[in-house]
């Protein structure tokens, strides 16, 4: 075969191989996302329509998100927590611009990662913005509320269109129905226009944590009968624990680790018990009331190869609602793996290795 033809074929094959490895290297970021697509559905004009794509670092290396851009002005993207350590979470926030757009719209969000390896991943959002229904303000935002407290927010719902349009019901999700009280009252109607006053109260039984719920207005509109309205806020816990996540990393079989957990309350409380459904954990604490308690947790890695993720639940005399949870993560190495030379990197989860990108970087270097 002609030497020039052989060189050309080899060059083509090498280029194809490099393109294939490059494409494979772009696959590893997808493992960090729960979903790559979100449908906002049908929403009202002026509504606070936001979706957060959850990103979980399942790898050993820190992940750094350097930027995100949108293909359409209908959606404004942003980043919450651009540096993500192992097991930590971040969010790509997509805000649907319902005040400046109406009708059907969609956008592609391109997320750029620069560490530990350059990569990009694309997310997709889409939805329909009604022009005949307007919320003022755009949603229910309780802000920050102490656990056990209550708060009330109101929204005006205005409609302009056909006469006879009505809101027949307001529905909450099954998971959050016990957290809110809802009142709806028609306050104005003339011709094809109507106005409703919506009042939402946060109950004192709402659990601690970030609130991200949704109410649904059910109307007699045959084409688009259901209109969502978002609920947002944060219930600060009465009882908290530091750290919330105990990442042990690679632990050789038979070895022991210990950690002191600091449990705090806004008022004095007593620890009544600690639950963890693993025999490898033991906990020690002092009884009696106080605003701060120290819990010593000891962990002994059982023989075998396995990944562990277990909640350590700290109960108090304030009741089941007023408890705190620390989640322990570990990768228990078998005896053979425990004897490997120093510097060996192990996985903290099924996907948590040095990432597929590292292998591709090595392959690329060998082919140069």
Image (cartoon, rainbow, N blue to C red):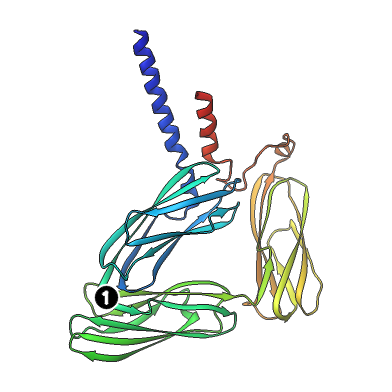
290 to the left or right of 345? right
Give the class, few, some or many, for how many residues have Cα within 10 Å of label 1's Cα (few <14, many ≥20): some
Q: Which quadrant would residue 352 be assigned to in this image?
A: top right
The residue at the point 44 percent across, 45 percent down is: 120
Residue 56 picture location, percent across and down: 53, 54
261 to the left or right of 71? right
Q: Is residue 287 above or below residue 279?
A: below
Residue 50 picture location, percent across and down: 41, 66
Q: Is residue 150 above or below residue 132?
A: below
Q: Is residue 29 above or below residue 161?
A: above
Query: What is the tally of numbered marks visible in this picture?
Result: 1
Q: Secondary structure at mark 1?
A: loop
126 to the left or right of 365? left
Residue nearer the viewer, 72 or 251: 72
Q: Is residue 195 above or below residue 324?
A: below
Q: Quadrant of the N terminus?
A: top left
The residue at the point 18 percent across, 81 percent down is: 162
Residue nearer the viewer, 144 or 150: 144
Q: Which residue is mark 1?
A: 225
The residue at the point 72 percent across, 69 percent down is: 274
Q: Which quadrant would residue 354 be assigned to in this image?
A: top right
Residue 3 picture location, percent across and down: 37, 9
Q: Which quadrant would residue 322 be assigned to in this image?
A: bottom right
Residue 37 picture location, percent across and down: 38, 56
């Amino acid at each position: 075969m002609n030497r020039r033809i052989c060189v050309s074929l080899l060059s083509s094959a090498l280029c194809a191989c490099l393109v294939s490895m490059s494409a494979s290297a772009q696959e590893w970021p997808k493992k960090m996302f729960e979903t790559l697509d979100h449908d906002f559905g049908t929403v009202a004009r002026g509504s606070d329509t936001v979706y957060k794509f959850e990103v979980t670092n399942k790898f050993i290396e820190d992940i750094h998100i350097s930027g995100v851009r949108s293909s359409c002005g209908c959606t404004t993207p942003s980043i919450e927590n651009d540096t993500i350590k192992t097991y930590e979470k971040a969010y790509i926030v997509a805000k649907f611009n319902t005040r400046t757009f109406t009708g059907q719209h969609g956008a592609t969000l391109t997320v750029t990662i620069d560490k530990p390896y350059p990569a990009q991943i694309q997310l997709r959002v889409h939805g329909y913005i009604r022009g005949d229904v307007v919320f003022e303000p755009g949603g229910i935002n309780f802000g920050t509320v102490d656990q056990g407290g209550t708060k009330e927010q109101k929204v005006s719902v205005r409609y302009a269109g056909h006469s006879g349009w009505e809101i027949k019901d307001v529905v909450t999700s099954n998971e959050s129905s016990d957290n809110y009280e809802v009142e709806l009252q028609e306050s104005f109607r003339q011709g094809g226009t109507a106005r409703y006053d919506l009042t939402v109260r946060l109950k004192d039984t709402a659990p601690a944590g970030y609130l991200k719920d949704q109410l649904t207005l059910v109307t007699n509109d045959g084409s688009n009968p259901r209109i969502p309205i978002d609920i947002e806020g944060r219930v600060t816990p009465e009882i908290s624990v530091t750290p919330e996540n105990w990442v042990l990393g690679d632990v050789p079989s038979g070895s022991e680790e210990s950690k002191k957990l600091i449990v705090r309350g806004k008022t004095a409380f007593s620890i009544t018990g600690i639950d963890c459904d693993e025999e490898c954990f033991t906990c020690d604490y002092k009884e009696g009331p106080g605003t701060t308690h120290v819990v010593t947790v000891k962990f002994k890695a059982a023989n075998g190869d396995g990944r562990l993720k277990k909640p350590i639940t700290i109960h108090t005399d304030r009741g089941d609602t007023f408890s705190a949870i620390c989640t322990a993560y570990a990768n228990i190495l078998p005896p053979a793996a425990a004897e490997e030379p120093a510097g060996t990197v192990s996985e903290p989860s099924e996907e948590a290795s040095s990432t597929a990108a590292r292998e591709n970087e090595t392959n690329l270097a060998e082919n140069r």
